């Protein structure tokens, strides 16, 4: 395309939103990682959650978090490039269930990304105005206590021989869908 001009890294850095702008435009989504065993995946989710500017990233159970060990911190930093670990609001919760119950009572909608009977195609799901998006362990998936709290289970189609998507890839599709809906006034595509 003849009118296209690639932004240099300097352009991109100069165009970064300020802290105030980021605060004002947060996506009303909390991403909850339920027992994610790979610190590399945690770093990818830090980067992604900062890119779409979610309200918070919650790291639950065995999920590695910055500071838990030098090894984990370095692994997270490797894929969570660009300072996302420093600016993204995050917290570690040993047991996320009480906090999820509390926010649910305040009107947050709990949507788990998972594969199984009773799920709905991801773009048809009602994510509500404020969403807790739950992602699960790389083999075992989302645990039973959080699945029980979920109002919807969103599933992305898998058409190849691979069983499932990487957890961060899966989150990426859904978070960009939610960003799109948020920017267009909350309307799901027809
Ligand atoms: C690698 S998957 C879990 C592995 C899967 N249970 C298996 O046996 O292959 C890790 C997490 O990514 C998310 N995930 C991956 N693929 C998905 C899909 N197609 N639809 C919805 N969620 C998915 C879910 O949150 C899941 O718990």
Image (cartoon, rainbow, N blue to C red):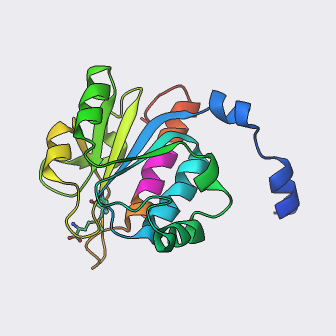
Q: Is residue 128 above or below residue 32?
A: above
Q: Nearer the viewer, residue 42 or 188?
A: 42
- Image quarter for ligand 1: bottom left
On the image, the x and y values in percent for residue 42 come to: 45, 62
Per the image, is 130 magenta?
A: no
In the figure, is residue 21 to the left or right of 12?
left
Q: Which image quadrant: the N terminus?
A: bottom right
Q: What stretch of residues is rendered in magenta?
A: 171-176
Query: What's the residue at 48%, 74% (across, down)?
Result: 71
> Would you say residue 185 is visible in this rendering?
yes
In the figure, is residue 6 to the left or right of 44?
right
In the figure, is residue 147 to the left or right of 91?
left
Query: What's the residue at 15%, 45% (across, down)?
Result: 145
Farthest top residue in view:
106
Query: What's the residue at 32%, 27% (across, down)?
Result: 103
On the image, the x and y values in percent for residue 165 come to: 35, 67
> Would you say residue 6 is visible in this rendering?
no
Q: Is residue 19 above or below residue 122?
A: above
Q: Nearer the viewer, residue 121 or 31?
A: 31
């Amino acid at each position: 395309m003849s009118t296209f001009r690639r932004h240099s890294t300097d352009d991109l850095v100069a165009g970064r939103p300020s802290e105030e702008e980021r605060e004002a435009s947060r996506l009303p989504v909390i991403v909850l990682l339920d027992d994610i065993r790979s610190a590399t995946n945690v770093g990818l989710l830090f980067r992604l959650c900062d890119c779409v500017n979610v309200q918070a990233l919650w790291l639950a159970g065995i999920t590695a978090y910055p500071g838990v060990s030098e090894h984990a911190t370095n692994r997270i930093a490797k894929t969570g490039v660009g300072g996302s670990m420093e600016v993204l609001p995050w917290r570690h919760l040993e047991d996320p269930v009480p906090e999820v119950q509390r926010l649910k009572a305040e009107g947050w909608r709990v949507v788990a990304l998972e594969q199984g009977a009773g799920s709905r195609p991801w773009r048809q799901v009602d994510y509500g105005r404020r969403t807790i998006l739950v992602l699960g362990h790389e083999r075992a998936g989302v645990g039973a206590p959080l699945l029980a709290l979920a109002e919807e289970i969103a599933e992305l189609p898998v058409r190849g021989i691979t069983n499932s998507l990487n957890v961060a890839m899966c989150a990426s599709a859904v978070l960009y869908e939610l960003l799109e809906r948020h920017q267009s006034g909350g309307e799901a595509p027809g």
